[in-house]
Amino acid sequence: QVQLVESGGGLAQPGGSLRLSCAASGRFFSINPMAWYRQAPGKQRELVAEITDGISTNYADSVKGRFTISRDSAKNTVYLQMKSLKPEDTAVYHCNAGVLMTNLTYLQVWGQGTLVTVSS
């Protein structure tokens, strides 16, 4: 069984910064890619940022230049550094990972989510 545990959410002022972390635990062969999604009230879940092979990154247009995704492969942890936050960034942020299990089964695993609120 694989678990993703997010941390780092909270309240930030417009223009402020937050850093989210997501750590994977359990027995698995490898994890790739890792990503952050978000879901605002009344809206569909959307991809925020994704990192593949620990190097290649992809961002939603709405966060380009403000958010940075990175990964510490040794710790099986992915980070999302968020700067210049806007009220429209308010959402529950979910970590997602593609996990290759030891029996070579490939699973999509989700974290429970962490709430980010941007408000003055």
Image (tube, grey):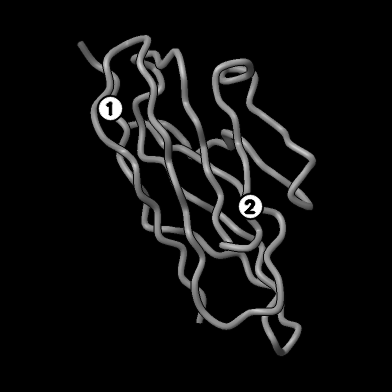
Which residue has dot 2 on it?
Answer: 34
Q: Which residue lies most toward the front here?
A: 74
Give the residue drawn at x 39%, y 13%. Answer: 86
Figure quadrant of residue 28? bottom right
Q: Amino acid at mark 2?
A: Met
User: What whole-number distance in Å separates the C-alpha atoms at marks 2 and 1?
Assistant: 23 Å
Q: Residues within 10 Å of mark 2 (few under 14, many from 20)?
A: many
Q: Amino acid at mark 1?
A: Thr
Left or right of 81, for residue 91: left
Q: Secondary structure at mark 2?
A: strand
Give the residue drawn at x 62%, y 15%. Answer: 65
| Above or below: residue 80 compared with residue 34 | above
Q: Earlier in the sequence, mark 2 or mark 1?
A: 2
Residue 31 spot, x, y in % from top left:
68, 65
Q: Nearer the viewer, residue 19 or 91?
A: 19
Q: Nearer the viewer, residue 65 or 109?
A: 65
On residue 90, which mark appears? none
Q: Secondary structure at mark 1?
A: strand
Give the residue drawn at x 51%, y 75%. Answer: 2
Residue 105 spot, x, y in % from top left:
71, 81
Q: Nearer the viewer, residue 84 or 73?
A: 73
Give the residue drawn at x 63%, y 26%. Answer: 60
Badge 2 vs badge 1, beta-carbon distance below 8 Å:
no
On residue 117, which mark appears? 1
Q: Nearer the viewer, residue 84 or 89?
A: 84
